[in-house]
Amino acid sequence: MSAEHEQDTARRARAREVGLFRYGLISDALDQALSTKQRGRLVRAVAARTHPGPFGAPVRVSRASLDRWIRGYRTGGFAALVPAPRRVVPQTPTEVLELAVALKTEAPGRTAAQVAVVLAAHAGWAPSPRTLQRHFAALGMNRWRPDGTPPAVFGRFEAEAPNARWVGDALHGPIVAGGKAILIAFLDDHSRAVMAARWGHAENAVALRETLRDGLAARGRPGQCYVDNGSMFRAWIRVSLGLLCASTLVVVASALYRMHLYQEAYGFTRMRLLVDVFEGWLGVLVLVTMAAGVTLRARWLPRFGLISGVVLLLGLAALNPDAWIARQNLDRYQATGTVDWHYLGELSADAVPVIATLPQPLAECALELDGRERDDWLEWNLGRSQARVFIETHADDWQYREECPGQTLR
C-alpha cells in the first residue's frame, strides 16, 4: 500500500469521525415529533454546552452551525455531515514536501520552523514554517508520536507548574429563582484544581472581580491570570466607553456654549466659525462612537470619520464663510447697533456683495475701494468678479469712513 493511499485513508477516517461527532450533537433534534419551538430550545441547549470534540479537545458549536448540519442531514443524509476534502493545488514542489516529511519522521520533536531551517540549508530555499505545519497536520504528524503516544509538550493552556497561570471563565447553568444561574470559576492551568468559584445571576466584571478576590485570598497570587474577551468584559467596555463619550459630549457642549457667548458679545469671526464647525463635527463623531459601542463592532468608524470630514469641508466651502460671517454680523448690527467695521473690511471679496446691501454711508465704513486693486486673471473667482463690478460702479463717489456708528472690537 502506497504512502499516498495511507494518507488518503487516514484523512477519510478523520472526516468520518467529524461526521459522527456532528451527528451525535444533532441526533435528538432530528426527531420528527418535535415542534419547531421544542427543536429550537433543544438546539440552543446544545449550543450552550461544551462538548468533547472528535479528537478529544473540548469544542463549543454555535447555533448557526447546528442548524446548518440539521438542514444538511435532512437533504443529504450522513454524507452531508462529513467534511469534504479540500481540493487545493499545492504550490510547493512535491520533492520538497517529501523531504520535509522525512526530516519530521526522523526526529518527531522537530518543529516546522526547525525543518524549514534544515531545508533552507540543504536546498537554499524552503517553504514557510506555516506551510510545513499545515502539511504535517494534514498527515496527522502533529497529533501523535510514531509509537502512538501523544507528544510530551505543553499545550496552549497548560502551565509548567502549579499557580503559574489561572484560567477564568463563565458557565451558564439552569434557571434558578427566576434567573439563569451563572458559574464563574478560576482553574489552575497545571493541576486543573479549582482556585475559586462563585454562583450568581450576573456575568459582568464585578462578579469576575469578586470571584478572583476569593481565589487570591485562599490560594495566593498566581503568576498569570488569563480570561477571554467575554461578555463580562464587553459590558465593562461598553460602560467605560459610554462614560468617556458622555464626558466628551459635556466638554463639546460647554465649548459650543462659550463660543455662543463670545459671538453674542463680540460678533462672528472666521476662527469662531471654524470652532463651531469643528466642535459640531466632533460631537457627531462621539455620538457615532457611542452607537458603535453598543455592538463593539466599529470597522466602519474610520471610514465614516474620513467621509464626514470631507463632506464637512465641502459644505463649509459651499457656505461661503466670509459672506456668511458678514451677513451674521450685519444682522447683529441691526439688532444691537454694534459691529466691528474694521473686521468687516478685512474679509475677502466674497463679503463685498453682502456689505453692499447696506446704505452707502454704512457700507463706506467697511469697504475701502481704493485699496482693492485689479486682480490678475490667474486670481479670478466669482467673489472677486462680483466685487470688481461693485468697485467699478461706485469708485468715483466712494469715501471710506474712519469714524462709524456702533464700532466695537471683536
Image: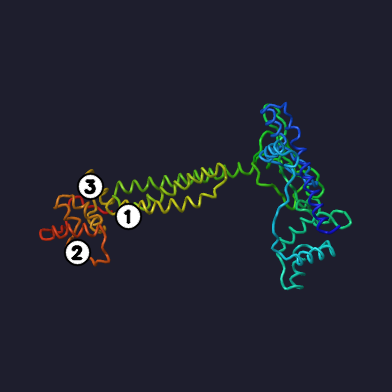
Q: Which residue is mark 2?
A: 371
Quarter-of-image position of residue 50: top right
Q: Nearer the viewer, residue 306 or 324?
A: 306
Q: Which residue is mark 1?
A: 270
Secondary structure category for the residue under label 3: helix
The amino acid sitting under disc 2 is: Gly
The N terminus - image quarter: bottom right
Q: CA distance from mark 1 to mark 3?
A: 18 Å
x and y, in percent, of residue 217 in the image = 75, 44
Q: Where does label 3 land, which residue?
A: 333
Q: Amino acid at mark 1?
A: Arg
Point out the tag, 2 or 3, that comes first from the N-terminus: 3
Q: Quadrant of residue 2?
A: bottom right
Badge 1 vs badge 2, beta-carbon distance below 8 Å: no
Local secondary structure at mark 2: helix
Furthest residue toward left: 397
Give me the C-alpha separation between circle 2 and circle 3: 25 Å
Q: Are marks 2 and 3 in contact (CB under 8 Å)?
A: no
